Image (cartoon, rainbow, N blue to C red):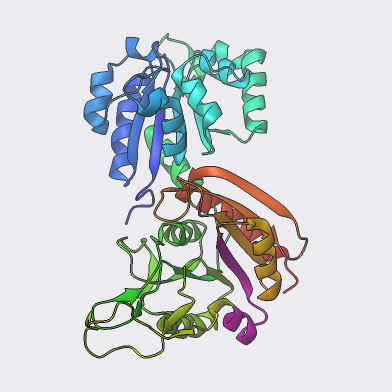
Amino acid sequence: MYSLQNRQILVGITGGIAAYKSAELVRRLQDDGATVRVIMTRAATEFITPLTLQALSGRPVHLDLLDAAAEAGMGHIELARWADLIVIAPASADFIARLAEGRADDLLTTVCLATPAPIAIAPAMNQQMWKNQVTQDNCQKLRSRGIRQFGPDNGKQACGDVGLGRMEDIADLRNHIKEIFTTGSLAGKRVVITAGPTQEALDPVRYITNHSSGKMGYALAQAAVDAGATVCLISGPTNLPPPARTQFISVTTALEMQSKALTEAQNCDIFIAAAAVADFRSANTAREKIKKGNGETLVIELVKNSDIVAEVRKQYPNLYVVGFAAETEAVEKNARDKLTRKKMDMIIANDVSQPGIGFNSDQNAVTVILSATAETQRFDKMRKLVLAQQLIQLIAASSSSSPI
């Protein structure tokens, strides 16, 4: 599998002769498994046509800040949320200056301000423009804000000058982009993650379950793999393909998930309980389909399932344990109670009563509470894969400093 498999990369193209190289970048990122969308500044269209980039990406090229065809006319917000990474290549001196100033006077600068995703620039300009102290100061500002800088390279330029200012070769840019998604923060660690719902049978055709899609747990598994971990994903029934490079274990019931979790946890460093496990199961599963009968009501006796997280903590007290709390009221209060009661190291809480986040959604917003410090950290609404990357970094940092 490619290292950029399933990644969503937004390529920004600004005005400069190096814009012709961006066509190759778009093609090669797709070869690496990424889904690519393109934003062009108006100046960029003077060097390469939007039709070329549309043909290569297979998607319309975005040009305008106010797009009547976009959802609610808010195309910049849609793109900002969509991206796992924004790469501006080439990044002209003008664009770098506007980004450093926090300008939002075209689509590309506005998306950069609105996105929670990482941003990288590949500068390309005349060697004297690159050496100018204003440009150097602007690049320093961007780097201090966490924006990555790739290049520029040294060599002969289109104007005939020789020096620094050429956009980096596409092969080098591809490698830099891949490295963003391979942070190594969990290198050498083994992580077990539970995901999805469980199904508790009532009879051969009916069962108790919940609305969990498994998307958050699967995103965490992918982010942990990208961070260098060996990952075991124990999943209830979902419609999702197993993330690449994971050990995948499929289960159906809470009892099956508990059995596999306890077995796999004995050789892991971090246990992340992202599954929405059914609290109850039928006391007596019918062998045959339960008939409607003549009565107006049907009584089914339920018994409580074991608490998987609590059992994992009990059997493996030195394991770093992360849990989830899907709540509909008093979210932080209930999450803190669960954190204490189950003796977890971290809990990630979200309000599943809110529209557009949580169950079945591609986006989420969560509150993280650490048991060691009682510190609270909030993550606003963003794509689950982007959120998972940030949560994995937090888990990696917290677990490495934990006394357990």
> Which residue is pictured at 65% across the width and 63% down the height?
334
Q: Position of residue 404 (x, y in %)?
A: 72, 74
60 or 383: which is nearer to us? 383
Res 283 seen here: yes
In this picture, residue 276 sits left or right of residue 206: right
Q: Position of residue 175 (x, y in %)?
A: 43, 43
134 or 217: which is nearer to us? 217
Does 79 sit above or below residue 388? above
Q: Quadrant of residue 395?
A: bottom right
Does 14 sit above or below residue 227? above
Res 25 seen here: no
Is residue 238 magenta-colored?
no
86 or 77: which is nearer to us? 77
Is residue 312 magenta-colored?
yes
> Which residue is pictured at 53% across the width and 43% down the height?
381
The stretch in magenta equals 310-326
